Amino acid sequence: MNDLYSYHESEHLRLKKKKYVATSVGIFIAALAVSIVLCFFVTAGNATLLQVINIILCSLGGCTSLFLLFNTILPLQNRQRYVSQVIGGKKKSICGVVTKIGGLITVSKNISAYEITVKTDDETEILLYWDKEKEIPDIVGKNVSFETVQNTVFGYEVEK
Amino acid sequence: MKTFFIKIRKNIWAYLICIFAFIIIWSSVFGFLTRISPQEKVSVFIGSYSQSFEKAQELQKSRPEYLKTVEINARVLNSMYFDVYLSMFGYSRADIMILPESLATRENCELYFAEISDAYLGQFENLGLCEYDGKAYGLKIHDKETQSSLISCINYGEGDKEENYYLFFGKNSLHISGLTEADKKNEWDGAIKIAQKLLEL
């Protein structure tokens, strides 16, 4: 059985997220620290200039941190949660012929998956979800044994 | 680049809140850092029918060296929030107040205005005064009967609105040491000097 997910992947996502959180917080703290240091040099003549510099510095730092949060950290967290759910979920075996690989649908926040139609031995059609991030092998028309967690493909094995 | 802007547009509210928050925070911080303490400024409150005081620059130029600024608050008497401004910027903070006779009540004089010593009054022999119980609190700067004014650039009103106007010194002012101790030389007499300059305008 070829497993699509592993604890290693979950750990890798956790570390990556940690790295981005540190970068995001670091950028913001650095901008804030520079602004605070500039405050010690305020005089009546340069107050307006320093005020504008501080507003720009902190806004840039804050917006960069928010950009990382919205576009990297939160998607990574969603993915890590999704992977953990799939790894820890109750597994079920489904065997059948893959008849079609459909389009993308959203299965969880920021997680997309391909729809796979499987026709079982008793002619029932089952819809399974194949994570977009995982490469789909050439399985159309083949008899495949799937291990699934709530219709998400966790592992597969092409039967001869 | 297009993706970058799409990503930004998705959460534009958060970025805008962030920028506005920093504008407010740093404006407050710099306002605090660059604020001028009451020891370094003389505040003048004018309650008349003038919305501004056009000789403000002249007052700034003639301020004593120890003062950083002369702050002028000119408020229109019949404006909706005049009483609020008078309480906020006049009675509680101003070193010099120019107000109409209707506000020169005994209660106000005792509560908010400094008593002017005879020694100081000696230099204004022909000037009218605002007096209660033999104590002088204000110098008359505008007489509605004779239409004479010591400060010409103030709109004292017309017709029924016109009143006598007085110049008062704030009771809590830090800059009137020469007012009560006119014979003593004291450097904290910024309000006295500014008042004298006002009377020359």
Image (tube, grey):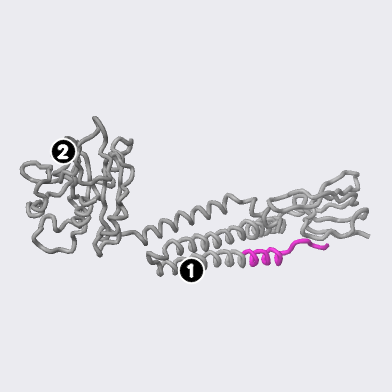
Specify whether B86 is left or right of A104.
left
Residue annotated with mark 1: A34
Q: Looking at the image, which residue is at 37% across and 64% down?
A: A44
Label 1, secondary structure: give it: helix
The answer to which of A80 and A102 lies nearer the viewer is: A102
**Magenta segment includes A93:** no
Specify whether B144 is left or right of A151.
left
- How far apart marks 1 and 2 lie (CA) works out to 55 Å
Q: Position of residue B183 (x, y in %)?
A: 8, 60
**What is the quadrant of the N terminus of chain B in the image?**
bottom right
Residue B158 higher or lower than A23, as above or below? above
Q: Which residues are magenta?
A: A1-17
Name the residue type under label 2: Thr
Q: Residue furthest top?
A: B160
Q: Chain of mark 1?
A: A
Q: Looking at the image, which residue is at 33% across and 35% down?
A: B80
Specify whether B69 is left or right of B182.
right
Callout 1 environment at 10 Å: few (<14), some (14 to 19), or many (20+)?
few
Specify whether B26 is left or right of B117.
right
Residue B28 higher or lower than B106, as above or below? below
Residue A18 higher or lower than B83, as above or below? below
Q: Position of residue B113 (x, y in %)?
A: 17, 47
Q: Position of residue A144 (x, y in %)?
A: 88, 56
Q: Position of residue B37 (x, y in %)?
A: 29, 59
Name the residue type under label 1: Val
Picture disc at residue B105: 2
Residue A83 higher or lower than B140, as above or below? below
Picture disc at residue B143: none
Label 2, secondary structure: give it: loop
Q: Looking at the image, which residue is at 16% across and 38% down?
A: B105
